[in-house]
Amino acid sequence: MLGKYEALAGSEGGVTFVGRLGTYRYIDMDVTIAEALGIAGAFLGGSRNSSI
């Protein structure tokens, strides 16, 4: 089922999937928040790097 979701997500433009549900993983909330901040910073042109 994950493969189907990844294929569908790959066909969408202008959409970013983050967080526990968006990446289809179970991770602690502190890690989730850190990843989301990193991705947002990279998207906005900030100095934080995305770890995904």
Image (cartoon, rainbow, N blue to C red):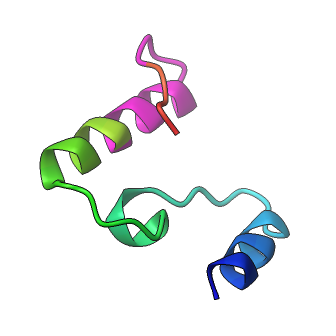
In the displayed structure, 40 sits above or below 42; it is below
Q: Tell me which residue sits at (65%, 60%) in the image.
A: 15
Span colored in magenta: 36-48
Picture layout, residue 21 above or below residue 4: above
Residue at the spot x=27%, y=49% of the render? 32
Q: Residue at x 46, y 16 (%)?
A: 46
When the figure is inspected, residue 51 is found, relative to residue 45, above or below; the finding is below
Residue 41 x %, y % = 43, 27
User: In the visual, does 9 lie left or right of 38?
Assistant: right
Q: Quadrant of the N terminus?
A: bottom right
38 left or right of 8 in image:
left
Percent from the top left, x then y, of residue 9? 72, 70
**Image position of 13 (left or right of 22):** right
Please say if 18 is above or below 37. below
SS assignment for the magenta stretch, majority:
helix
Is 46 colored magenta in this rendering? Answer: yes
